[in-house]
Image: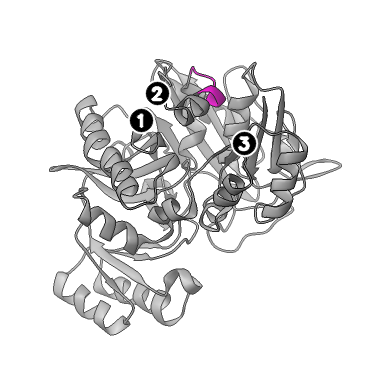
């Protein structure tokens, strides 16, 4: 098989690493990729937005399967264009990907199909939004309607913070068109987890659950990020909770999208809150989560390409998982998720016997890797227990690694309660 992965981040590097293990994959390409992926795949200098060039490359190189990683190309219809060109692609159409692209669409869809989620209202008028916040009280959650790279969500503990979020999104246009409409929703209490599934039409094959840490700093302090670390599986999420979420959330979403004429093919991601009333949806994504992918795929025993082919062919992929735990910690540029410097020498944390490294925002110079993004890399490890996996990762990060210009959280895999004791 010849396989093409589209994207350049840590999620795509994890996909590439997993595909490189398959004996069926003869030629593996990534467009545009990053220099950290070059050991497992051939990087192709084509941007994710250059659909005509990507399709041309796929045809010229007899690509048997294309996997689209990031959300923006999906919402721009890249999968549609591949399908129209007669190419096999494992990714949702732009119509199906709207479940991620518009939070107001997703909330209305969940209400219509009786998928458990937080109560909400949608606003374009700032004064109406503030009036609703005053009526409902705090804490409350304000979300930019469109894509905002994981940063368009404000959990407001006070009315002042909530009002400022409304001003930032609807008045100052902090997220441009993505924040031209906002969803204001009930604050859910409980423990968060992510549940992803391989989906094709009404067929849904869930993965093991993961938990990511979105806040920038220890003790869940600081602004929201794209994710500072993750682990899988999640010991406090029961099999019953996963079965409920699969049946009442993932299956209902998949069948609902079919009913609405926007059938989903690809990775359906449910960001969930385990509440006293059971799992409820915080958000849907239309692709592999990042950094959850980095800790889930290393535990998958199956060949990833074969799983996707089976799902596309209507076959049960019979997912098989290692009985271990995987944990990963993100090394980020100082200042992230705000402004940060690029071109800083990246510390050498190449894989050793007990850890692995996944690269995201990196470039290359004659002397080594340079930073080229907010989240630069992830160091991960597997272990029999969460404690063992966690110990391996932090020992690697703390072993004579110069992290000047970078930072990472020291509490990934610890509960907030454990940290505060």
What's the residue at 49%, 43% (across, down)?
Answer: 290
The residues colored magenta run 301-306
Magenta stretch containing residue 188, yes or no? no
What's the residue at 30%, 48% (across, down)?
Answer: 259
Indicate the quadrant where residue 155 lies.
bottom left
Q: Relative to the observer, which residue lies in front, 382 or 239?
A: 239
| Disc 2: which residue | 387
Q: Relative to residue 258, is residue 351 depicted above or below? A: above
What's the residue at 38%, 79% (across, down)?
Answer: 167
Residue 311 seen:
yes
- Say if mark 3 contacts mark 1, CB within 8 Å: no
What's the residue at 65%, 24% (across, down)?
Answer: 20
Q: Nearer the viewer's eye, disc 3 or disc 2?
A: 3
Sequence-first disc among 3 and 2? 3
Indicate the quadrant where residue 132 lies.
bottom left
| Disc 1: which residue | 206
Residue 274 in picture, x, y percent from top left = 22, 41
Whole-angstrom CA distance, mark 3 to mark 2, is 25 Å
Sequence-first disc among 3 and 1? 3
Sequence-first disc among 2 and 1? 1
- Say if mark 3 contacts mark 2, CB within 8 Å: no
Position of 210 with respect to 282 (left or right) is right
Q: Which circle marks residue 13 in the picture?
A: 3
């Amino acid at each position: 098989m010849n396989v093409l992965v589209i994207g350049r981040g840590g999620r795509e590097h994890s996909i590439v690493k997993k595909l490189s293990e398959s004996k069926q994959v003869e030629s593996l390409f990534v467009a545009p990729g990053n220099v950290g992926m070059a050991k497992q795949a051939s990087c192709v200098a084509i941007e994710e937005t250059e659909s005509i060039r990507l399709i041309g490359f796929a045809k010229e190189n007899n690509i048997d399967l294309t996997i689209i990683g990031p959300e923006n190309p999906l919402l721009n219809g890249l999968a549609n264009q591949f399908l129209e060109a007669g190419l096999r692609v494992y990714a949702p159409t732009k119509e199906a990907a709207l479940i991620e692209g518009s939070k107001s669409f997703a909330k209305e869809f969940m209400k219509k199909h009786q998928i458990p989620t937080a109560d909400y209202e949608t606003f374009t008028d700032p004064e109406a939004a503030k009036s609703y916040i005053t009526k409902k009280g705090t804490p409350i959650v304000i979300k930019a309607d469109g894509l905002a790279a994981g940063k368009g969500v404000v959990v407001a503990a006070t009315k002042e913070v909530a009002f400022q979020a409304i001003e930032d999104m609807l008045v100052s246009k902090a997220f441009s068109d993505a924040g031209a409409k906002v969803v204001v929703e009930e604050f859910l209490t409980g423990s968060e987890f992510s549940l992803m599934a391989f989906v094709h039409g009404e067929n849904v094959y869930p993965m093991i659950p993961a938990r990511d840490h979105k806040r920038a700093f220890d003790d869940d302090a600081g602004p929201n990020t794209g994710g500072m670390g993750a682990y899988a599986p999640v010991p406090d999420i029961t099999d019953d909770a996963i079965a409920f979420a699969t049946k009442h959330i993932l299956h209902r979403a998949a069948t609902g999208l079919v009913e609405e004429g926007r059938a989903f093919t690809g990775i359906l991601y449910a960001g969930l809150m385990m509440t006293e009333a059971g799992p409820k949806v915080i958000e849907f994504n239309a692709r592999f989560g990042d950094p959850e992918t980095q800790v889930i795929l290393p535990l998958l025993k199956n060949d990833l390409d074969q799983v996707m082919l089976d799902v596309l062919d209507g076959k049960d992929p019979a997912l098989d998982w290692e009985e271990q735990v995987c944990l990963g910690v993100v090394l980020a540029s100082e200042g992230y998720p705000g402004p940060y410097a690029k071109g800083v020498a990246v510390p050498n944390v190449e894989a050793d016997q007990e850890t692995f490294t996944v690269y995201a925002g990196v470039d290359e110079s004659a002397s080594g890797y340079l930073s080229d993004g907010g989240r630069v890399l992830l160091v991960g490890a597997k272990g029999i227990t969460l404690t063992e996996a966690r110990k391996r990762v932090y020992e690697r990060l703390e072993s004579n690694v110069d992290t000047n210009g970078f930072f990472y959280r020291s509490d990934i895999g610890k509960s907030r309660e454990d940290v505060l004791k």
